[in-house]
Image (cartoon, helix red, strand yellow):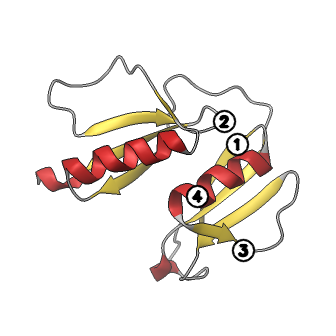
Amino acid sequence: MLRIGSVVMGVSDVPRATAFWTAALGYVPLEETEDDWVVLVPEKGGAGAAAGPQLALGLSETPVQEHPRIHLDLYAGDAAAQAAEVERLIGLGAQRVEWDAYPPDADFVVLADTEGNRFCVIDTGRG
């Protein structure tokens, strides 16, 4: 049986992206960071599947997609936690994205990391 080992994101600046995602998620590099590749894992959990997914950042010259086919969803427990996390992530360098596909009752906020990669912060308290 296969399982997902890592989610891989292309970035133009691996050290900058590493700084953002380690602060955003509380992850640490699995091994020494290189200029073109790093694998991040949950700080307390190591690389085990129960600890959470790995996030790999690889050097890429591919332009960022305006409507990416794959992206990260980060879960917040309720609307207040979502708002607090959005502000914390913006403080780390993320930017709000003017998203043209928000439904009227959206439970998500679209942000871009320091590399322009889009991700969502989800209010999971809505049921």
Secondary element at image label 1:
strand
Q: Quadrant of the C terminus?
A: bottom left
Q: Dot 4: within a 10 Å radius of its alpha carbon, few (fewer than 14), some, or many (20 or more) residues?
A: some
Question: Closer to the observer: label 2 or label 1?
Answer: 2
What number is the disc on residue 115? 2
In-image side of 79 versus 75 (left or right): left
What number is the disc on residue 69? none
Which numbered disc, 3 or 2, marks the residue that appears first in the sequence?
3
Q: Residue at the spot x=69%, y=47% of the render? A: 17
- Can residue 113 be seen in the rendering of this structure? yes
What number is the disc on residue 10? 1
Secondary element at image label 2:
loop
Q: Residue at the spot x=52%, y=61% of the render? A: 25
The span from disc 4 to disc 3 (Cα, nearest Å) is 15 Å
Residue 23 % position (x, y): 58, 58
Secondary element at image label 4:
helix
What number is the disc on residue 23? 4
Residue type, mark 2 in image: Glu
Question: Closer to the observer: label 1 or label 4?
Answer: 4
Residue type, mark 4 in image: Ala
* Number of numbered labels in the structure image: 4
The span from disc 3 to disc 2 (Cα, nearest Å) is 21 Å
Which numbered disc, 3 or 1, marks the residue that appears first in the sequence?
1
**Residue with the most extreme right position:** 35
Residue 79 % position (x, y): 20, 47
Which numbered disc, 2 or 1, marks the residue that appears first in the sequence?
1
- Pointers 3 and 2 in contact (C-beta within 8 Å): no
User: Residue beneath label 3, please?
Assistant: 30
Residue 22 % position (x, y): 62, 60
